[in-house]
Image (spheres, rainbow, N blue to C red):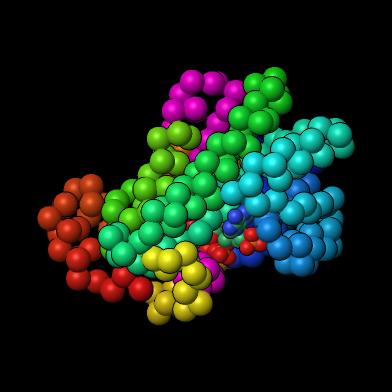
Amino acid sequence: MLEFKNKVVLITGGGTGIGEAMAYQYAMKGTNVILTGRRLEPLQKVMQKCISLGVKAWCKTVDMEKTETIDQLVEWIHSEGHQIDFLLLNAGISQRALTLDTDISVDRRLMEVNYFGGIYLVKSLKDMFLNNGVHIAVVSSVSGVFGFPVRSAYCASKHAIHGFYETIALEYPQIKTTIIIPGRIHTEVSKNALDGNGKATGVMDPGQANGYDVNKCARVAIKAIARGRHQKVIGGFDTIMVPFYKYIPCLFRFLARHVSAR
Ligand SMILES: NC(=O)c1ccc[n+]([C@@H]2O[C@H](COP(=O)([O-])OP(=O)(O)OC[C@H]3O[C@@H](n4cnc5c(N)ncnc54)[C@H](OP(=O)(O)O)[C@@H]3O)[C@@H](O)[C@H]2O)c1
């Protein structure tokens, strides 16, 4: 089991949803928390709650699409002398639009936020990670395992995550990775998802509203990280699509075409 107490975790997208719930899980294990995201207000609220749980916490505004803001974060980490023991790459945006109705700018944006921003951060901290080791947990999705309607760009960005973090863990013994694979979790992700023109839908999908509890998701995720699991599928009945995809692909394709994508 990994040691969490008095370590430091850096969380992207730590102000809401799964990132917020994970911040409390790390804090309850005694891990000091650095939270990042674009909006300061939710980050400050989560920071205060982490402090009330007895750990140190900081927050910094970072936009995963803007490498200069990631550079500023890395500079701050070095200037404060923080050692990052755990990294939770959680910031992400989803999509709700058919593939050919999705403007290419949306495909690129999702790749930047969901994939390139995270790997830029990892590469920016490489000396620290190579010298001292790190456990990287990265939030993928069941959409990182298979394709799913109205999420082509999102699926592509999450599939990319698997390729990168599986490989880096094979190359460097001091870098451990856990790929978190949630099904539908009750957060605002569908409201923040982009339509084909890059506008947030603002719609709470029924699938999301009836999704798996976010705190339960975080509890299962922290256990998987503690046990050093390489991958962990988390969620309700919808995650049955993962074994269907692997073992009964024709059933998977039938269901994926017919169940509601929203
Ligand atoms: N909920 C689900 O059903 C589900 C299922 C599978 C996977 N996931 C994944 O779980 C992760 C968290 O999503 P969630 O469900 O918790 O939804 P959420 O509440 O919308 O969380 C997304 C987080 O990412 C941050 N973010 C978005 N764009 C960003 C950017 N350009 N730069 C920095 N931070 C950015 C947001 O903060 P700001 O807006 O303040 O930047 C927010 O805190 C995502 O990677 C998502 O793909 C969710």
Task: Answer left or right for 227 relative to 208.
Answer: right
Q: Is residue 220 magenta?
A: no
Q: Is residue 94 visible?
A: yes
Is residue 177 shown above or below 221?
above
For ligand 1, give the image quadrant: bottom right
Q: Residue at x 44, y 54 (%)?
A: 105
Percent x, y of residue 184:
42, 66
Which part of the image, by quadrant, shows the C terminus? bottom left
Give the quarter of the image for residue 39: bottom right
Rendering quarter of residue 106: bottom left
Question: In the rendered view of the protein, which quadrant contains the N terminus?
Answer: top right
Residue beneath the point at 73% across and 66% down: 42
**Residue 124: image location, x then y, percent:** 66, 31
Depth check: give the residue in front, 125 or 227. 125
Residue 17 relative to residue 242: left or right: right
Q: Is residue 232 visible?
A: no
Q: Residue at x 75, y 42 (%)?
A: 73
Q: Nearer the viewer, residue 198 or 157?
A: 198
**Region of the chain picked out in magenta, as a range:** 166-192
In front of the other: 220 or 83: 83
Residue 167 highlighted magenta (yes or no): yes
From the viewer's perspective, is 6 left or right of 210? right
Given residues 57 and 205, the one toward you in this image is 205
In percent of width and height, residue 232 lies at 44, 48
Using the rendered view, name the quadrant where residue 14 is placed: bottom right
- Residue 144 is situated, as x and y percent measured from the top left of the image, at 38, 49
- Residue 246 shown left or right of residue 118 in the figure: left
At horizontal 54% and vertical 21% (from top left) the residue drawn is 172
